[in-house]
Amino acid sequence: MPLTPAERSHHLLVALLVHAGGSVTLPASALDPDAIGTADSAHAIELRRYADGSVRVSVQPRPRGAGDGAGLTYL
């Protein structure tokens, strides 16, 4: 069964935190509406896999009206 957008976001967050040693300290402004893309926090996630097996995770704001949740694009 495919993951929901919320489950995908959760899995990526956990993977990033584990890779970073378990925690990351963010400035208070990191959760401001402008920092997370839009007032409703819509975002798109891109995963780019490299020949050595590593994966680059990128996040960018989604345009208003593009739907809610997280979009996931594999490159």
Image: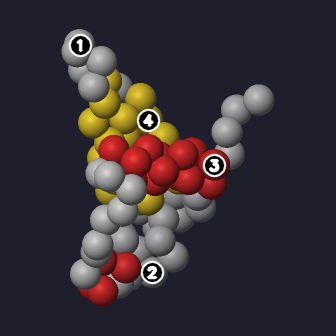
Give amino acid for label 4.
Answer: Thr
Q: Residue furthest top?
A: 51
Mark pair 3, 4: CA separation: 15 Å
Which residue is at the front of the view, 58 or 55?
55
What residue does disc 4 label? Answer: 73
Residue 42: x percent and y percent? Answer: 48, 65
Crowding at mark 1 (Cα within 10 Å: few <14, some 14-19, many 20+): few
Circle 2 sits on which residue?
39
Q: Is residue 43 above or below residue 8?
A: below
**Gap between marks 3 and 2, in whole Å?**
21 Å
Choose the circle earlier in sequence order: 2 or 1. Answer: 2
Specify whether 25 is left or right of 3. Answer: left
Spatial separation of the CA atoms under disc 2 and disc 1: 37 Å
Amino acid identity at mark 3: Glu
Q: Are marks 1 and 4 in contact (CB under 8 Å)?
A: no
Where residue 67 sits: x, y (%)? Answer: 58, 58
The one nearer the camera, 12 or 65, is 12
Q: CA distance from mark 1 to mark 4?
A: 17 Å
Instruction: Identify the element where label 1 is drawn.
Output: loop
Sequence-earlier tag: 1 or 3 = 3
Is disc 1 in contact with disc 3, using a CB cutoff of under 8 Å? no
Say which residue appears at 25% left-offset and 81% top-offset: 27
Q: Earlier in the sequence, mark 3 or mark 4?
A: 3
What is the crowding at mark 2: few (fewer than 14 residues within 10 Å), some, or many (at least 20)?
few
Disc 3: CA contacts within 10 A as few (<14), some (14-19) or many (>=20): few
Q: Which residue is the site of mark 3? A: 7
Residue drawn at point x = 51 percent, y = 76 percent: 40
Residue 68 location (% of width, % of height): 59, 61
Disc 1 marks which amino acid?
Ala
Residue at (48, 50) in percent of width and height = 14
Mark drawn on residue 51? 1
Q: What kind of element bears circle 2?
A: loop
